[in-house]
Image (spheres, rainbow, N blue to C red):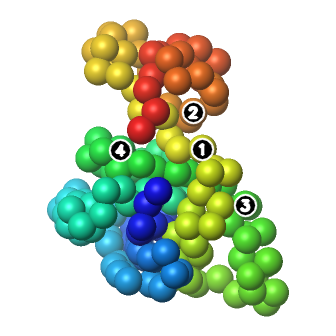
Amino acid sequence: MAGLWAGIDWSEQLNDVAVVDRAGTVVARARVPETPERVKELLRLLAGLRSSHRHVPVAIETGRGLLVRALSDAGQTVVPINPSVVARYRGRLRPTRQKTDKSDAALLAHILRTDGPLHRPLTVHSDQAEAWPGRSAGPCTGASTSTTSCARCCGRSTRRR
């Protein structure tokens, strides 16, 4: 089981990141512009956390884009959570439903900490599937429940991280 969980409130230009520990305390925060250089910086931050903890899963409100692809390629477990699901959690925890990017990043991390097994991680494709010239672009949406085939989603062989 993980000892740290990360949440990223995603936007096309700026991403807020929060990392929580087992007690639910926010132990790290960052604000990362959606640029290749800053995404690499975020990956270094997460890699540093992984060196002291085996595993740091990341919750994010999207299943595609530069950031998701970079996280997945770096070996991070990425758990896309639908924004409407996040809104329901927000309403349960804060009846006023006041939203800030900073608080949503922490909320996403808390969702993984408390209800992680209820959310499906992004499916990562095998190297053989990636080499197939007829494959569709982008990461898999994880529509298949199988760990060896994602035929309902994209027809590629997959493995789960």
Q: Amino acid at mark 3?
A: Val
Mark yes or no: residue 78 visible. Answer: yes
Along the line of sight, which residue is nearer the eye, 137 or 128? 128
Q: Secondary structure at mark 1?
A: loop
Sooner in the amino-acid sequence: mark 2 or mark 3: 3
- For image coordinates 39% across by 10% down, the residue present is 134
N-terminal-most mark, 1 or 3? 3
Residue 12 visible from this viewpoint: no
Disc 1 vs disc 3: Cβ atoms closer than 8 Å? no
Residue 102 screen position, x and y as percent: 50, 83
Choose top left, top right, bottom left or bottom right for residue 57.
bottom left
Q: Secondary structure at mark 3?
A: helix
Residue of label 2: 142
Q: Which residue is mark 3?
A: 85
> Looking at the image, is 107 positioned above or below residue 122?
below
Residue 153's quadrant in the figure? top right
Say which of marks 1 and 2 sits in front. Answer: 1
Tag 4 residue: 72
Do tag 1 and tag 2 residues touch (Cβ < 8 Å)?
yes
Q: Which residue is disc 1 drawn over? A: 120
- Provide residue 1's location: percent of width, then percent of height: 47, 56
Q: Nearer the viewer, mark 1 or mark 3?
A: 1
Q: Is residue 107 left or right of residue 156?
A: right
Distance (Cα) linking label 1 and label 3: 13 Å
